[in-house]
Amino acid sequence: MAKMAETGKKNTGSDCWIHLSIKKSGGIKIDLKSKVQSMYGDAIRKTAEEILKFFGIKNAVLAVEDNGSLPFVLNARIETAVKKCFPEKEEEFLSPIIPQNLFHVKRDKFRRSRLYIPGDQPRLIINAGLYKPDGIILDLEDGVAPTEKESARYIVRNALREVDFMGAERMVRINQLPLGLRDLDFIVPHGVHTVLIPKCEEAETVRDIDAHIKALRTQHKIKKDIYLMPIIESALGAINSYKIAAASPNNVALTIGLEDFTADIGADRTSEGKESFLARLQVILAARATGIQPLDSVYSDVEDEEGLRKDILEAKSLGFEGKGCIHPGQIRIVHENFAPSIKEIERAKKISLALEKAKKKGSGVIALGTKMIDLPVVKRAERVLNLAIQNNQLPVNWKEELKDEGND
């Protein structure tokens, strides 16, 4: 009996629909309908034949309805169909990782904004880097319907290798365990920087994921670190937030998901946020106590810019360093409002200059007026200055400009 499988989406821009029917004879037949057939029809057929040959398929009918999909999408959709017909096949049809995606990120990099993109929506993935978020999250969890999770893994895997995210940290939100362990197989060998752990309630979950990543790094000879970002989304998670934050040296941030959290405690999410105030503080305290970044939840009303602005300023006042975004239009507002104030910048400059003066004198004591400045305050000042430079509020050579003005 013939094996058949279909995957993908019809009438959806930058995507394609695939129907694969395995035959006993007759060779390979490609039935192609494409909006760009006159220009790329031959290339699409050639790619399809190459993939089928790679997987050892000699007799099949492959129907393709293409709506301008890029190669990484077409390849993923065809491979998904093949694997549905032959689950036992372990080979992967991979294109080279583009040079732009070979960089690594520092564990303490700025994560002011992280943009969520559903992992099965290539039309949104393609241009995500244009909006300049600090991180791009390819979502395999809530953003993807249960029936689409398997095919989304191939899309995300190929996107990590072939899509230019323009310097943004490449993040993936996996599914809850045990399904999330299978997700790791699709992302760890392919250039993911940070793995988001949804609905994290126990430190053991972090350790299980960390161990699986370690095994995959050994298997694939990956030397670069892969970071973790647990998401607190329940009462139990909030109570265990310190244990979760301290569970792995690869944790770089702790964040909170307020939609799921408020549902878990039986409350409505309000603009005032009284129902989640304690949990947000627990996340901040756990992150600070373990030396990682506390990051706030998303703001769900994409049309309410003023509400978003107020929400960011409150988050910043509590101690959060960043916020999730569900729409590209939120990124600019997040960056502007997490930027340091003029007062913060001026104080940081004074502390930095005092440090430089103390070093020239060979003194271990840093003084600002009559006040002594300790190391944590110096580190905070350096972070404020770096953030000001990144936000174009301060030139990189601001100290040199002061000297040129005679303010040495």
Image (cartoon, grey):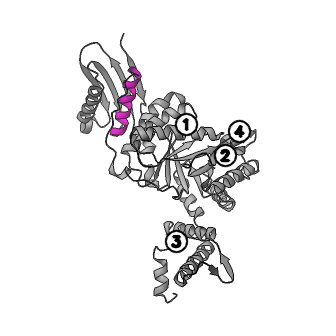
Query: Which residues fall within the magenta stretch?
Result: 68-85
Return the disc, 1 or 4, that comes first in the chain's sequence. Answer: 1
Give yes or no for residue 77 being in the magenta stretch.
Answer: yes
Can residue 130 be seen?
A: yes
Determine the image quadrant of residue 349. Answer: bottom right
Q: What is the secondary structure assignment of the residue under circle 3?
A: loop
321 in relation to 212, above or below? below
Task: Kindly identify which residue carries mark 3.
Answer: 393
Graded by Cα atoms within 10 Å as few (under 14), some (14 to 19) or many (20 or more), the crowding at tag 2 reads some
Task: Kindly identify which residue carries mark 1.
Answer: 141
In depth, the one of 397 and 69 nearer the eye is 397
Task: Kindly identify which residue carries mark 2.
Answer: 243
Task: Kindly identify which residue carries mark 4.
Answer: 263
Return the disc, 2 or 3, that comes first in the chain's sequence. Answer: 2
How far, Cα to Cα, is label 1 from label 4? 17 Å
In depth, the one of 196 and 339 nearer the eye is 196
How far, Cα to Cα, is label 1 from label 3? 37 Å
Give yes or no for residue 349 being in the magenta stretch.
Answer: no
How far, Cα to Cα, is label 1 from label 2? 23 Å
Image coordinates for residue 292, horizontal then vertical, percent: 59, 55
Q: What is the secondary structure assignment of the residue under circle 4?
A: helix
Image coordinates for residue 168, horizontal then vertical, percent: 45, 53
